[in-house]
Image (spheres, helix red, strand yellow):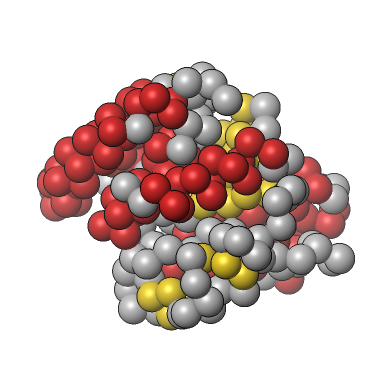
Amino acid sequence: MLLYPGLTALDFVGPQHMFASLIGATVHHVAKTLDPVVSDSGLALSPTATFDQCPADLDILFVPGGGDGTLAAMRDEALLRFVQDRGQRARWVSSVCTGALVLGAAGLLHGYRATTHWATMPLLPVAGAVPVPSRVVRDRNRITGAGVSAGLDLGLTMVAMLRDRPYAEAVQLLAEYAPEPPFDAGSPRTASASVKAIVEPMFDDFNEQGRAALGRHAARTRPL
């Protein structure tokens, strides 16, 4: 599980909770150094391994999303080399939210169906991916989740794949994951026009910079 400054904490913590429930598995929190990594909300997360210390062959490579931190990650050559290297050999390559764009910048989504945060879906084709507006999208060994909270769904989906459905349902029950949100505004399909008018402009600059960052790595977007 990749860590980088400015990631969205829930993108990481939701799937981490699910992966950590896999009895017998070792979950590596990987960053450039072992210094605490501060999320976009100020929550500090502790790496357990550096890029060099991370095992070469992984069952799962997971990349969380974020805002400005993700844009920086998409321009970070050392980080992208790590993601590309581990991603080429990993059994499963996964992401949540704008983490898909980091996979895209590393050339790991070309020709794959994928999802990301609803507001950044137009960037997926720039990475050679086919955008699918679903909570979790699986295409061969690429499994991507939509925005932030979809990481819980992605985590449970992967637990079921790696173990079985009863195991995943037990993990879900232990987490009491039975969402009943107080408002029906968690999707652009259900949010009001006035709410969307507040949120959509927040991504204008991100999408512009994200498009430029993906363009810089166009050579990597051919199939690996």
Give the image location of residue 204, x and y in percent: 15, 43
Which one is in front, 25 or 193?
25
Residue in view at x 78 percent, y 43 percent: 161
Seen at 86% across and 65% down, the residue is 24
Side of 76 where 91 appears, left or right: right
Q: Which quadrant would residue 169 be assigned to in this image?
A: bottom right
Instruction: Give the residue at x 14% y 46%.
Output: 205
206 horizontally vs 144: left or right: left
216 left or right of 151? left
Give x and y (percent) for residue 27: 70, 65
Q: Residue at x 74, y 48 (%)?
A: 57
Where the N terminus falls, by quadrant?
A: bottom right
**Relative to the observer, which residue lies in front, 46 or 150?**
46
- One can see residue 97 in this view: no
Is residue 164 visible in the rendered image? The answer is: yes
Position above or below: 5 against 115: below
Taking depth in this image into account, of 37 and 65 the one nearest to the observer is: 37
Q: How many discs appear?
A: 0
- Quarter residue 28 falls in: bottom right
Q: Is residue 194 above or below residue 27?
A: above
Quarter of the rendering occupied by the C terminus: top right
> Residue 64, position in %: x, y?
47, 55
Q: Nearer the viewer, residue 9 or 45?
A: 45
Q: Quadrant of residue 137?
A: top right
